[in-house]
Image (cartoon, grey):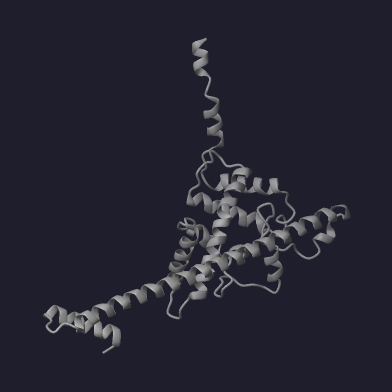
Amino acid sequence: MSSNSEAIPNAAESTSTRRKSPKWTTDQNLVLLSGWIKFGTDSIVGRNQKCESYWGKIAEYCNEHCSFDPPRDGISCKNHYNYMNPKLAKWVGAYDSAKRLQQSWWSEQDVLAKAHELYSSANKGSLNLMQEWLNVRDQPRYRSQIGGNTGSESSGSKRSRESSAGDTNSVGSSVRPIGRDAAKKKSKKKGKNAVLEVEEKEWNDFKQFKEQELERLDKIVMQQEEGNKLIKEKTESKKMKMFIKLSEKEHLNDQSKELLKKLTHDLFGN
């Protein structure tokens, strides 16, 4: 009896083990995003897939092109993409804010450095998905809206953008070729129209979220500028007090004379 009892695993530990999410490496993230692009932007299969089928194909793609232990299923892939997506969206907002602040002499590295500063200030931590962003920055969902966007847009790009940003239950950014809906049976039209309405709502929600994020980052930039101005004023005030104190002395040693000379230059430019 005692040996049988010892062989029974603790139920709480077993449940905890089952619920623990596996960790993803950068290489695995890149394969996941590659699958998202492959199956989400395919004009033939992309828009007409059910959620389970869509993420199931991405899971198969991930397990085929990268080593996973344990192998990933559709739910795992969908949940991890939902973890990365808001982080990438916030980073795009920070990057766009940095582009707005870009000076003529700034390089792309300067823009990225400013974007990291803004992202860290707004989210209390740095972005750990830089390589992932570099691989999806040309996708409409993650493309910068402030000039210098990579890739080109055709005359149908507006429709492509509007169809790109439904949540992870929708499947990508490409528009179905003209005439594809007309080939479907009339009995399916009502369901498809409902899906399109949901996707349009989700796209509008995404745009609203991005606008709010940009507005929040702009406020942070203003606060930083005000803080820098206050620090400068305090520094100048200290220098002026020191200047007055040294000026009132009749005899100064060489070190004090040099300090007075420097203060005069800093305060008055003489």
Taking the view exactly as shown, the residue that stands out farthest to the top is 1
Q: Nearer the viewer, residue 159 or 18?
A: 18
In the rendered structure, the answer to whether residue 120 lies left or right of residue 266 reads right
The number of numbered discs placed on residues in the rendered structure image is 0
- Locate residue 238, reporting x and y percent: 29, 75
From this view, report whether residue 83 is shown above or below residue 233. above
Instruction: Report which quarter residue 207 is drawn in.
Output: bottom right
Vertical placement of residue 12 versus 57, above or below: above
**Outermost residue toward the right in this view:** 186
Q: Which sits in the foreground, 178 or 9?
A: 9
Which quadrant holds the C terminus?
bottom left
Residue 211: percent from left, percent from top: 61, 67
Q: Residue at x 44, y 65 (%)?
A: 117
159 vs 216, nearest the viewer: 216
The answer to which quarter of the image holds residue 172 is bottom right
Q: Position of residue 126 (x, y in %)?
A: 45, 58
**Residue 185's quadrant in the figure?**
bottom right
- Locate residue 230, reporting x and y percent: 40, 73
Q: Residue at x 55, y 52 (%)?
A: 31
Residue 228 vertical position relative to residue 19 in the rendered view, above or below: below
Q: Is residue 252 left or right of residue 92?
A: left
Residue, x 77% and y 55% (percent of image)?
A: 195
Please name whichever residue, 1 or 43, is drawn nearer the observer in this view of the structure. Answer: 1
Left or right relative to 190: residue 170: left
